[in-house]
Image: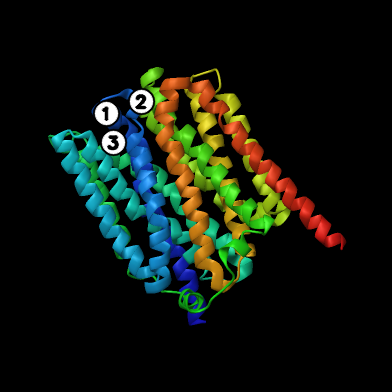
Amino acid sequence: MNNNNNNNNNVWLLMCCQALTMSIASFLVFLGSIIGQQLAPDPGYATLPVGAFLLGSAVATLPVILAMRRWGRKSIFIICCFISAFGALMAIHSLILQSFVWFVAAAVVLGLGLAAGQQYRFAAMESVVAEDMAKAASRVLIGGIVAAFLGPEIAIRGENLFETAYAGSFGLLIGVIISAMLVLLFFKESPVTHQAAAEKGRDLTEILTQPIIWVAVLSGIASFAVMSLVMTATPLHMHFENGHSLIDTKWVIQSHIVAMFLPSLFVPSLIRRFGEVGLIGMGAAAFLVAMAVIFSRYEFINYWLSLVLLGIGWNFLFVGGTTLLPQSYRESERFKVQAFNDFTIFGVQSCSALMAGWLLSRIGWQNVLLTTIPVLGVLAMVVCYWLWSRRRQAAY
């Protein structure tokens, strides 16, 4: 009974940590390109801080997961909070110096710290029985609803706290990071983590011969590649190119992030009814509608509706892929597969964010949107191949 209570407590604690830690992401997504536009020597580099943030997270993913395999999740979660706080201090220093290079470096360090936060969903899934994994992962993601408001809100409220604009915003961010660290002190490590580290499973090359793992991974890749590209470019296109206010831009980004996580309240029931493939299909459809809504009309409502649909599509694709992933590995293989999955997904995400500002300035908004279609096409082909191979195996 105590073990069940600890497991339930873990999921709720990790949901709280998700709310606090992922505020770093919503904070940087909203403010990073705006500060970048002010500090960058070329407008094409405006989204570089956001891309650098995501790149730092991607680069740190593999070392963080391997470190968790050796020393456990809790200690690495806490260490990464310290790294994030240091990154925020670097950002304050860069703003005082008005240095774009230092600001980009600070964004990288913040990304390094966030890499551990991406593992909250797996830590929650390890705390429950197999049939409750989708519910645990979805419940943790619900914390992102709070993050959607908290990150941009402290960015705005801290803008003029000190003489240097936005230095106070990063000061408030440090307070949020410290709060996450305190919550993590109550996290109970799952024994599965240490058991899996002690066993040896199949080689990764053998695991990757299964079509199901590619459906899971490519669902994650598509969710982040499309979402990151459009979301990162939106503040620039909305605020600088089409004259919408910073408050309206903030509201669109906040609504988008809420839409990324709010569906987690009912996604487990959608999976039970339509399955993971049905959820992935609905996510891809939401993406396509989002592109159509904002393709040629740039009123506030178009941005808002498009970014909400973008968030919903991300949730369906990401949760669908996350839920499928454990079906491709054994307990002893979880760390290597999770490392491959997250390194690939967040690597692609960082590339999308890095390219967003450059693509927007070079090929224009509509062509940026059109580049998302081939990504969804590849995912559709892989899903079809997996379904075909599964039916073929069932026939024999």
Q: At label 1, which amino acid type do we have?
A: Ala
In primary-sequence order, the first of circles 3 and 1 is 1
Q: What amino acid is at disc 2?
A: Gly
Return the x and y of residue 144 as percentages of the image width and height. 44, 49
The mark closer to the camera, 3 or 1, is: 1
Whole-angstrom CA distance, mark 1 to mark 2, is 8 Å
**Tag 2, which secondary structure?**
helix
Q: x, y (%) of residue 234?
A: 44, 29
Proximity of marks 1 and 2: CB atoms separated by less than 8 Å: yes
Seen in the picture, residue 212 relative to 75 is either above or below; the reply is: above
Please name the residue shown 53% across and 59% down the image. 137
Judge the density around disc 3: few (<14), some (14-19), many (≥20) Cα neighbours within 10 Å: some
Q: CA distance from mark 3 to mark 1?
A: 21 Å
Which residue occupies the foreground of this view, 156 or 387?
387
Task: From the image, tell me which residue sits under label 3.
Answer: 156
Q: In the drawing, does residue 322 fall left or right of residue 163?
A: right
Residue drawn at the location 24% of the way across and 48% of the way down: 88
* Mark 3 or 2: the one toward you: 2
Asked which secondary structure carries label 3, the reply is: helix
Going by the numbered disc 3, the residue's amino acid type is Ile
Identify the residue at horizontal 34%, vertical 41% (top origin): 52
Query: In the rendered image, which residue does mark 2 sit on?
Result: 44
Q: Secondary structure at mark 1?
A: loop
Q: On the image, numbered disc 1 is attached to which residue?
A: 40
Residue 205 screen position, x and y as percent: 59, 61
